[in-house]
Every structure is written in structure tokens, then in C-alpha cells.
Amino acid sequence: MTKMAVPMAYGLLAVLGFSLVDTYFVSLLGTQALAAISFTFPVTFFVSALAMGLGTGLSACLARLLGQGLHQDAARLTSDGLLLALTTVLTVAVIGINSIEPLFRLLGATDTLMVYIQDYMFYWYVAIPFLVIPMVGNAAIRATGDTKTPSRVMIIAGFMNGILDPLLIFGIGPFPELGVKGAAIASGLSWLITFAVAIYLLRYREQLLLLTKPNLAKMLKNWRKIAAIGLPASLTNMLSPVNNAFVMWQLAAFSTTAVAAYGAGTRLEAILLIGMIAVSSMLAPFIAQNSSAKNPQRCLTAIKLAIRYSLISQLSIYLIIALAAPYIATLFSDDVAVISHLSLYLYIIPATFTMQGIMMAVASSLNGLNRPMPALSLSVLRSLLIISLSSLGGFYYGEKGIFFGIASANVLIGLLALYYAQQLRIELRNELGDKLENEFQLK
């Protein structure tokens, strides 16, 4: 588990670093530019969530086939899965480009902010095939047990993004000064690296990418298999940007500085949860393969260790964040109001990441055991709790009440996830007992 999760954490850190680096350099353009980019976060995360969901579905299905030694079927499944991802992302890009204005108006963007949003989102939509295909392809590579190679590629791409961002945003040297659109173009050029490497590895090293014409009936069957897990997983991931969009809409009624602070905070959230994101991403294929191999003991141990890791790591991280919150906030803005709101966010919400991490681990375990609907139900309930409790908190206590509402939702859903985990432990112990009894009878 450690050998799989640690490289994955580095790779995910690089992926999330794209967003964080963009946020930092755009913040140097001023509060208006930072607020505009904050408005785009729910949409960009929505697309990333879709890709992660498809990757989860593909990796879980692929792990079962590889565990059974069916390599040719695995290659066909991977090829069909990438075709599904390409079809989906092109559809999203076309719809997205033609709905930038009405969508962000609906979210509460002002005329001033719309100028920045238009510049950023058009180029971002053009580039997203180079983001989504590698994300799904890398999930397939991780299903083979190799988490190091995809992570190394993403680290290189993240490094390239960090170099290109200031060059294209501020027009350093021979580069044009493009402002916020420069951040989107820099990300797209960096994603192109991951796209090329992922396709090469799947085709030539793993031999999981077929260039033959797919059989329509077989392709649709594989799409259904991937979607059975991938669609609920995507919906689970998509609920987070929906929640963020709703919270952003509430904060917009108070001030632009609150929106800017929340946008920076949500991007920091992904970094602070990087360990749990890596562990939960690894759990689905890990448990799927061991469950398929009739090894419930390893599934049981994996779930227990993931929950223990969330308790220890997220509490340790929060202690550091609570001490450094004001200093972290100054990295994203020199506006006193933004610093105050962001510091408040960091004091309140990360305190509950332990419980949120437990929910992530349990949901991923359920996906690995081919139970996507209970996993989805956890996320749906969390979303409903965030909407209701943040609304209640905002009505009585303003921005602080909204943050406390989100934190309360995390605690409640974490407790429910622990109940789910206990039920899984009982089932896996029973399955282990049956297996040992059968082995004894055979002997």
C-alpha cells in the first residue's frame, strides 16, 4: 500500500500544484483577477472530477481482469475506456465554450470579473483533452501496480507549468504578456507532455492500447462496465464542485474578498488532503484485485490502515496549519480582508479533514468491492449537509457561519462512514471465515 500510495501522492501533488501555482501567480495580478479565477474553480474541478471518476471505473474493472490473467480483454477494455473518455471530454468542451457567459453570470460573476473569466476558460476548455486522457490513462497504468511512472511524468509537467506560468502571465523576456489566459495556456502546454507519455506507455510498454477497430457490441459492453463504477464515482467527485459553487454563491452576497479567500482555500484543501486522495485512489484497484483473487484479509487490512492513516496524518497537518494560517494567507494576497477570511477558513475547516478523509477511504473501498451506489450515497448526503448547514450558518453568522456549516457536515459524514466501515469489516471477516473453513474441508 505504501509503495503504491507514496508515488501517487507525489503525482497528485503535481496535478493539484497546477491549480495552486496558477492561483499564486494570478493573485499577483490583483484581487479582481484572483476572485475571477476562484469563480472558475467549481467548473475546472467538475471536469477533473469527471476524469477521475472515469479513471476509477476503468482501473477497478481493469484490475479484476489483470488479476485473472486476461491481458487481451484488459487491453480491449483500456482502449474502449480511453475512447469513452475522449468522446466525453470533447462533448464537455463544446458545451463549455458555448456556455461561459450564462454559467458564470448564474454563479454571480460581475462584468469586471467576466473579462478575466472569458480569457481563462476559453483556452482551458480547448486544452482539456490533454488533461482528461492522461488522467484516465494513468489510472489504467496504476491498475497494473505501477504508480511511480505516472507520478514522475506529472511531476515533470508540474515543473514545466511552474516555469511557463510567470513567463506567459507577465510576458517575461520574449514571451507575450497574456494575463490570466497565460495561466490556462501554460497548463495546456504542460498537460501535452503527460498526454504523449501516457499514450506511449499504454501502447508500447503495457501493451494495453489497441489500434484495431473496436467491435461496437463489445465496446458498448465495456462502456457499461466502466460506467457502472465510473458514473457514480464521477457523480461523487462532481458533488464537490457543486458544493463549492453553492458556497461561492453564498459568499458572493457578502463580499468579493470572501470569494477570493474561499477560492484560495479550496485549492489549498486539495493539497492538505493529498495523502488521503492518494490512499483512496489506490484503494479501489487494490481492493478490487484482492477481492477478485479471493483474499478478504488483505481487503480488511487495507481499509483499517487507510482509516488509521486519516486519523493520524490529517490531525498532524491541522496542527501545523493552525499555527501557520496567517502566514499562509499572505502568500495568496496582500489584501487585509482576503487574508482575514482565508485565515478564518484555515482555522475552521481543516480541523475536520480527518473525518472527510475517512469518508474518502470508505467510499473508495466500496467502489473496489463493486458497490458504487453506497459510495455515492455518502457523497450525496455530505453535499446536502453542506448546503443546508452552510446556509443556516450564513444566515445567522455570515461568512464564519458558512465555514462552520461546512465543518459540521464533514464531522457528521465521517461518523456515518465509520458505521459503513464497521459493516464492511463484519462482512469481510465472515467471508474470511468461510474461506478458511472451505480450505480446511478441502485438506
Image: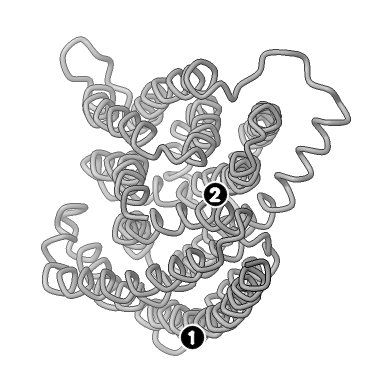
Image quarter (top left, top right, bottom left or bottom right) of the N terminus: bottom left
Type of residue at label 2? Ala
Where disc 2 sits, the SS reads: helix
Q: Residue at x 26, y 69 (%)?
A: 313
Pointer 1: what residue? Answer: 415
Nearer to us in this view, 292 or 265:
292
Q: Position of residue 13 (x, y in %)?
A: 31, 46
Q: Is residue 45 visible?
A: yes
Which label sits on residue 49? 2
Q: Quadrant of residue 262?
A: bottom left
Instruction: Report x, y in % for residue 160.
Output: 27, 25
Vertical relation: 95 (above or below) 392: above
Task: Farthest residue to the right: give it.
Answer: 217
Is 70 on the left or on the right of 310, as rendered?
right
Nearest the camera: 107 or 306?
Answer: 306
Left or right for 113, reference 14: right
Q: Earlier in the sequence, mark 2 or mark 1?
A: 2
